[in-house]
Image: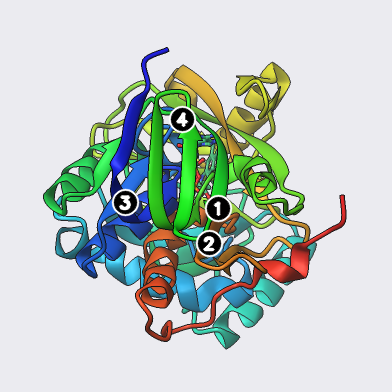
Amino acid sequence: MNIRPQHDSTYDVAIVGAGIMGSSTALFLARGGMRCALIDRRGVCSEASGINAGTLTMQMTRAALIPYALKAWEMWNQPEQWLGMDPGVTICNGLSLAFTEPEIEVLEQRARARREFGADIEVISSTRARKIEPALSLYPLAAAYCPTDGHVTANRTGLAFRAALDQEDVELFDNSLVRSVVQDATGFTILGDESIIHAKRIVLAGGVWLQEMLRWLGLNISIKTLINQLAITERMGPAMRTVIGIANGLLSLKQFSNGTVLIGGGWQGQGDRETRITELIPENLVGNAQLACHAIPALLQTRLVRAWSGFEAETADAMPIIGEIPGIRDAYVIGSAHSGYTSAPYMAKLLAQRILGNSPEMPLFNPSRLLTDT
Ligand SMILES: Cc1cc2nc3c(=O)[nH]c(=O)nc-3n(C[C@H](O)[C@H](O)[C@H](O)COP(=O)(O)OP(=O)(O)OC[C@H]3O[C@@H](n4cnc5c(N)ncnc54)[C@H](O)[C@@H]3O)c2cc1C
């Protein structure tokens, strides 16, 4: 085994997990003057954060998280300002479609709840929706319209973060599986297959693997695993100019500048996080694609070229865990946010404010509420 010992250097903070949550936290901590080690068993944004649908949506974000998502949306609007590079951000209108009267009621309720938290969403007629998105089929009866929408090319996220982290001298330990963490009077020793790292503080940012990471410190918080499927079409001429969803949440559609259309909506695959192996469920792929063609008939003219799936984390109350790890000084956790890609940069900024000794601009999400005995 080829261990890289780091005994000679103690970092101010070690962040375990280099998804968008961990990478953003490292970035803001480094900008705040901390010497950071960022450790991942794979690489920067190589799990959910590099393979997700990249929708920057308010429509499907939980109402209580809208203030966080709006702040993050503003950040995504100007990625050069905080990330240094544009990972392919497109800001555009978003439409969530209703095909039945009960679905119109769902959209009305959802829009009301989100408006209370500041999202600009209104339910409009299908005629108006078709003016905003001429590619729409004749099936929708109405749509919830939100001008604060858009998408990012998720597989460019890692590239952008790597450059930004490098610029801030964050020391990256990729291909470094962490096995355990031990606390002593001087901080934390992070024991991995490839490295032994010592740091005064630790941030656990393990996405769907947070449950296992928290166990290193003797805590039990159950993390549910969702296995979301996505599919992408071959390139086609310009067909869509909005992000499309539907009332029951089972569709998300957007066309990238290279002409490909990404089809998602949380249709589930199968697999398990322990082996990290996922498999597609073909019937779910077909159902997802049929729904896409029902909404945007131009998609009938194109073919799917690739499909994949990835792990998304969810807590028992479907709210994030962000803040101090209860009972363990200088240990923090961040993750499990619904629409986590959208909100990550802002949520990480808040956690960094706390770690740097300042009051976060908005409340964090205390992990204590989720602790269980086993
Ligand atoms: C298919 C799919 C589509 C999605 N679509 C959207 C969307 O359109 N919009 C949106 O806002 N959100 C979306 N999401 C959710 C979003 O991708 C996640 O909320 C977000 O990326 C989570 O980031 P994270 O950093 O917490 O986790 P991850 O990106 O999973 O990062 C966790 C990291 O921890 C590392 N790690 C784990 N265990 C260890 C260990 N023992 N040692 C070292 N490293 C370890 C992993 O290698 C990984 O890199 C989607 C998710 C999926 C799967």
* Sequence-earlier tag: 3 or 4: 3
Binning the other alpha carbons within 10 Å of mark 3 as few (below 14), some (14 to 19) or many (20 upward) gives many
Identified by mark 3, the residue type is Thr
- Quarter holding the N terminus? top left
Residue 197 against residue 327 in the figure, above or below: above
Marks 3,4: beta carbons within 8 A: no
Element at badge 3? strand
- The residue beneath circle 3 is 10
Q: Is residue 87 left or right of residue 329?
A: left
- The residue beneath circle 1 is 183
Element at badge 4? helix
Which residue, as the protein is rendered here, is positioned at the far right?
A: 373
In the rendered image, is residue 8 in sight? yes
Picture disc at residue 299 = 4
CA–CA distance in space, label 4 to label 1: 55 Å
Q: Write the residue at 67% across / 40% down.
A: 212
* Sequence-earlier tag: 1 or 2: 1
In the image, 102 versus 374, the foreground residue is 374
CA–CA distance in space, label 1 to label 2: 10 Å
* Sequence-earlier tag: 2 or 4: 4
Marks 1,2: beta carbons within 8 A: yes
Identified by mark 2, the residue type is Ala
Identified by mark 4, the residue type is Leu
- The residue beneath circle 2 is 331
Q: Write the residue at 58% across / 60% down.
A: 60
Element at badge 2? strand
* Sequence-earlier tag: 1 or 3: 3
Marks 1,3: beta carbons within 8 A: no
Residue 185 against residue 223 in the figure, above or below: below
